[in-house]
Amino acid sequence: MLGKIKNKLAALLAKKYVKAILAALIVVGAAVTAFYYVTSPSRLIRPGHAVEGSEQSFDREIINIVLLGFDRDEARDRIYTIYRPDTIMIASLNLRETKVSVVNIPRDSYVPIHGRDFYDKINHSYAHGYNLRGVEDRHKSGLETTLRTIEDFLGGIPIHYYITIDMDGVVEVIDKVGGIEYDVDVTVRNESGRVLLNKGPQLLDGEKFLHYVRYRGVGGDTGRVSRQQKILIAAFSQLKEKGKLKDLPQIYKSLTENVETNLTLTQITALAVFGLKVDPEDINTYIFSGTNQFAPRGDQDISYLVIDERARVELIKEVFGITVEQRPQITLPGPRKREKTQEEGEQEIEEPAPVEQPGEEVPPGEGEEEPPGEEPPPGEEEQPGAEEPGPGGEDPGSQPGGGEDSGGGQGGEGEDPNPGPPGTGSPQEGGGFPKMPKIGDLGELFKGGRFQPKFGP
């Protein structure tokens, strides 16, 4: 009898040991698998696919991530409804060579808007998608239109992942990493001329960092983009030196209110590990170039950046290794012709001819009127008690010596005050930028944790 009891106990202990060993193996296996993927970002994305109009396939060892910086903060939510991605920065990560290229598309670039039959500023693409008829999720539609418009501009080069951040998010991120030491190269002033940030070496907290990266008073938007690239590389270098890159996944988890991405936490961790291997000297920066030209819209003359098509194709080839089709070069008609009379002073005497688009006959901004017989979407009519925004025009910060970018649908000469269909950018009582959904909320659009590019319309 005693022998049988001992045998049963031995069998039970053996089963427990086996379970314990199996559990340990599972844990170890999971850890090894996680380490395998975290230390090898290329295994976290799908193989490359064909680029439209090219027999070449996009290199699967290159990941393209776009950073969209929206001109939104909590204070503006009390006034405005729709915001603009004023920063469009693409980071192309070469996992094989451990190199990074940073490419900016200027916010005023005159481009075809995806899914529409007209051109507009690229930072208006979100508003055009947001105001599409019949969409259930306006934010998702605005974001998709923005991403597709960027891909179209790049000639079909895929955007694999995206990160959006608003102004409050920038402040929070910089404060959480303890600020950034930086030798500020320009004196930053607000619209009234008050100094917000002096030149010289200093520790920038979130608010000061935001003032600096938004300032367009020196060099206009191109100057701002160049400064953004330099300070972000400096921030990356400092985080790497201080061993804080590893903290980014945890920081992201606390920032889902003001930061949105289709990267998973595992992918963010893998990219942080990849960042440890990147030498800041191997980060190359580029800006798409063009000329400032004017075209009439409504009763205003709007300034656009018309991209140099030959330079666009060459830059895409240099950065992404793909030769894309060169589109016809556009020339806008310029501002209205005016003359002065003794009685009336300045008087409009001639409307310029509509701009001719390649393959279409739509002048700048046309095509945004509401289709007949359809009700305007929410936010397109004046709300009780709401005030109309001030006169349109270019943001004061874009003029030489101007102040910090005012954004939020306001501005001075040359800026279109109402991007998108009528009413876009107008105040709405109780309105506000749609809260950025957490990972997974855009499942239909971003399947498998990766933005699925569509080539062509």
Image (cartoon, helix red, strand yellow):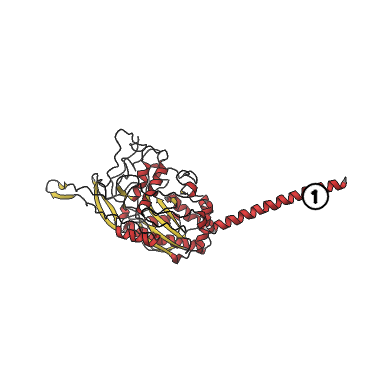
Does residue 141 appear left or right of residue 348 in this picture? right
Q: Quadrant of the N terminus?
A: top right
State the residue lying farthest toward the left.
342
Residue tagged 1: 10
Quadrant in which residue 39 is drawn: bottom right
Q: Helix, strand or loop at disc 1?
A: helix
Q: Which of 256 and 13 lies nearest the eye of the viewer?
A: 13
Q: Which of 128 and 35 lies nearest the eye of the viewer?
A: 35
- Numbered marks: total: 1
Q: Which of 47 and 208 lies nearest the eye of the viewer?
A: 47
Task: Bin the neighbour count of mark 1 within 10 Å (Cα to Cα): few under 14, some 14-19, many 20 and up.
Answer: few
State the residue lying farthest toward the front.
55
Percent across and percent down for residue 219 are 32, 60
Is any atom of residue 40 visible in this view?
Answer: yes
State the residue lying farthest toward the top.
373
State the residue lying farthest toward the bottom.
281
Residue lying at 61% horizontally and 55% vertically, measured from the top left: 31
Q: Amino acid at mark 1?
A: Ala
Percent across and percent down for residue 421 are 32, 41
Does residue 229 appear left or right of residue 290 in this picture? right
Residue lying at 58% horizontally and 57% vertically, measured from the top left: 35
Percent across and percent down for residue 116 are 32, 44
Is any atom of residue 226 visible in this view?
Answer: no
Quadrant in which residue 369 is drawn: top left
Does residue 6 appear left or right of residue 201 in this picture? right
